[in-house]
Amino acid sequence: MAASTPGSATHTGPWDAIVLGAGHNALIAAAYLAKGGLRTLVLERRDRVGGAADTSEIGPNLRVPTLAHTVGRLRPSVHRDLDLKRHGLALMAPDIRVFAPALDGGPSVTLWDDVERTAEGLRALSPADADAYPAFDRLVRSIGRFLDELGRSTPPDVRAPGLSDALTGLRLGRQFRGLGKGDSRTILRVLPMAVADFVAEAFEHDGLRAAVAWRGVRYCAVGPWSAGTAAVLLQ
């Protein structure tokens, strides 16, 4: 398959860029390359594209994502730049973010999109955790916004820094100070932590700890006691 320069006929070579694999990340990269005017070729050994974002049919009329079950890391800029809505992409925001049934038949853990609704549901498990959840959610969102901005910033040229590098540093510095003393100290302390230890500081119920901590180890091939997994949760 080929991602040709917009406005041109399908190109047959030579190519300016060759992308190996047609997963969702590769397709985005190829689209940007082609959008930038490069003659781009995408090679895929399967007869379908999408990679982890592909849809698999695991039973009669039962279709599920192959792996990528959320789009939390799809940046709005990508959605806008590639005009994905016009090409048919429709996003859903489910009311329930996480549902974790208890193996022993006890109360399940449900994390709703609504923080107060989540806290109220947790009261049957642990009144202390119900009281702690809104503050924990606020902390994770606050640090997550800063880390997202940090991740979207172009790293400075340390060999020959220019004005743009200085301005980027100043902007990030202001945003870091905007976290406040409490959150700025917390982010420095928790980023190297294991996610199991991070959630254990906030909650006492094992079911809730697991329901929150799993997001720190998905796609990582590590366990919840591995150093640095708290940073994955906060992203």
Image (cartoon, rainbow, N blue to C red):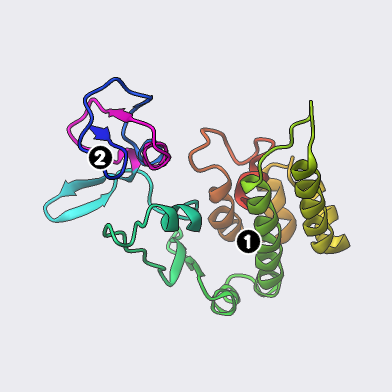
Q: Are marks 2 and 1 in contact (CB under 8 Å)?
A: no
Q: Which residues are magenta?
A: 28-52
Q: Amino acid at mark 2?
A: Ser
Q: Position of residue 31 (x, y in %)?
A: 37, 41
Q: Is residue 232 depicted above or below 86 in this figure?
A: above
Q: Amino acid at mark 1?
A: His
* Label 2 Cα neighbours within 10 Å, binned few <14 / some 14-19 / many ≥20: few
Task: Kindly identify which numbered label has been placed on residue 187.
Answer: none
Q: Position of residue 57 (x, y in %)?
A: 18, 47
Residue 84 appears in the figure: yes
Q: Position of residue 55 (x, y in %)?
A: 25, 47
Q: Which residue is mark 2?
A: 8
Q: Position of residue 125 (x, y in %)?
A: 58, 70
Q: Is residue 227 depicted above or below 18 in this figure?
A: below
Q: Is residue 184 depicted above or below 223 in this figure?
A: below
Task: Kindly identify which numbered label has been placed on residue 205.
Answer: 1
Q: Secondary structure at mark 1?
A: loop
Residue at 40 percent of width and 69 percent of height: 94
| Outermost residue toward the top in this view | 14
Q: Quadrant of residue 7?
A: top left
Name the residue nearer the viewer: 182 or 88: 88
Residue at 50 percent of width and 51 percent of height: 73
| Mark 2 to mark 1 CA distance (whole Å) | 59 Å
Numbered circles on residues, count = 2
Mark toward the start of the polypeptide (2 vs 1): 2
67 relative position to 217: left or right: left
157 relative position to 216: left or right: right
Residue 103 appears in the figure: no
* Label 1 Cα neighbours within 10 Å, binned few <14 / some 14-19 / many ≥20: some
109 relative position to 196: left or right: left
